[in-house]
Structure formats: C-alpha cells, structure tokens
C-alpha cells in the first residue's frame, strides 16, 4: 500500500468516525473468508458496515473525532462495525459472536461514551431504532383507537336495541 492509498484510507475512516453513531471494535482472529463474508452480509442486511482496519492508520483517523478515546482498542487483528443506528452494529456483532467464538468484541463507543465489551452486549439487547419507532407509533395510535371505539359503542348499542324492537314487532 503506497502513501496515496494510505491517505485515502485515513480520510475515508475519518469520515466514517465523524458521521457514524456507534463504533464496535472486534478481534477477528481465526475467522475464515466465508465467515467474514457472512458477517458482512448480515451487517449489510441490517443497514450497518463491517470493515477490517489497519491499526496504525485507524489511530491516525481517530484523531480529532468524537471517538478518539478508543484508540487503545486497536491492537491485534481488529475490525470495526458501524452504522447510523447505534444499536444495529452491536446487535449484529453480538449475535454473530454467539455462534462463532473467533469473533471477540473488544469494546466500542457511542458518541463520546466509551463502551467496554459488556457495554456493547448491553447495547445489543436494546430494541433497534425501527422497533422503537414502531412502539411509539403504536402508543400514539392506541388512544385514538380507544376513543373511536368508545364513540362507536353507543351508536352500536342503539342500533342493536332498534333491531331487537324491530324483530319483536315482526314476531308479534
């Protein structure tokens, strides 16, 4: 890799660190190409990214970003998972790590908050942004549905009473 490619990689990583909501740092030693490809596919399907990084270049790219406090996590064979949704990368990496002991979660950060491996696992247990939006919409719609049901109930009862009187008159 020549200097130009290294500069481009540092610039690209710096842009990632400046724009993303969450970074999860992993050690991938022992994973084969098929397993890494499977993890990347899962990340892509969830709307996140997984990238193998060069430690020295990553430490340079971290300078001046909100994630500069995690530069000590980059030693050994490291890769990062990142996304705009803070829960997604943690959730996918934690799920993959359950089935494959060769992927080890080292730590990460969410904004300026540094996370250890247990913090990433706790973050993975939270509902995703889409799930939270769905719950919020459900909570907002529930009162309106109940109000509509309450308003329709008297009219329905009145219609049933009128129907019963009509049936009674026809029977007589």
Image (tube, helix red, strand yellow):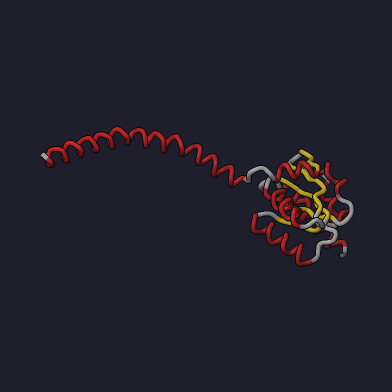
Whether residue 162 appears in this view of the structure is yes
Q: Residue furthest front?
A: 172
Q: Position of residue 166 (x, y in %)?
A: 16, 39
Q: Residue furthest bottom?
A: 34
Q: Quadrant of residue 145?
A: top left
Residue 104 or residue 101, whichever sits in front: 101
In the image, residue 144 above or below residue 51: above
In the image, residue 71 above or below residue 49: above
Q: Position of residue 171 (x, y in %)?
A: 13, 41
* Residue 79 as seen in the image, left or right of residue 125: right
Q: Quadrant of the N terminus?
A: bottom right
* Residue 168 as seen in the image, left or right of residue 25: left
Residue 14 or residue 44, whichever sits in front: 44
Q: Position of residue 7 (x, y in %)?
A: 83, 58
The residue at 83%/54% (across/down) is 27
Q: Quadrant of the C terminus?
A: top left
The residue at 75%/51% (across/down) is 15
The residue at 59%/42% (across/down) is 132
Q: Position of residue 69 (x, y in %)?
A: 83, 41
Q: Quadrant of residue 118?
A: top right
């Amino acid at each position: 890799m020549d200097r130009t490619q290294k500069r481009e990689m540092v610039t690209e990583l710096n842009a990632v660190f400046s724009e993303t909501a969450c970074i999860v740092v992993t050690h991938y030693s022992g994973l084969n190409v098929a397993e890494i490809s499977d993890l990347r596919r899962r990340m892509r399907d969830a709307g996140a990214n997984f990238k193998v990084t060069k430690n020295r270049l990553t430490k340079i790219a971290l300078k001046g970003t909100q994630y500069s406090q995690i530069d000590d996590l980059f030693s050994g064979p490291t890769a990062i998972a990142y996304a705009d949704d803070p829960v997604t990368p943690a959730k996918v990496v934690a799920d993959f790590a359950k089935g494959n002991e060769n992927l080890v979660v080292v730590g990460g950060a969410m904004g300026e908050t540094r996370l250890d491996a247990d913090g990433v696992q706790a973050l993975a247990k939270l509902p995703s942004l889409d799930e939270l939006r769905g719950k919020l919409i459900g909570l907002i719609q529930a009162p309106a549905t109940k109000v509509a049901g309450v308003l329709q109930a008297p009219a329905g009862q009145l219609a049933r009473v009128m129907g019963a009187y009509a049936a009674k008159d026809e029977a007589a």
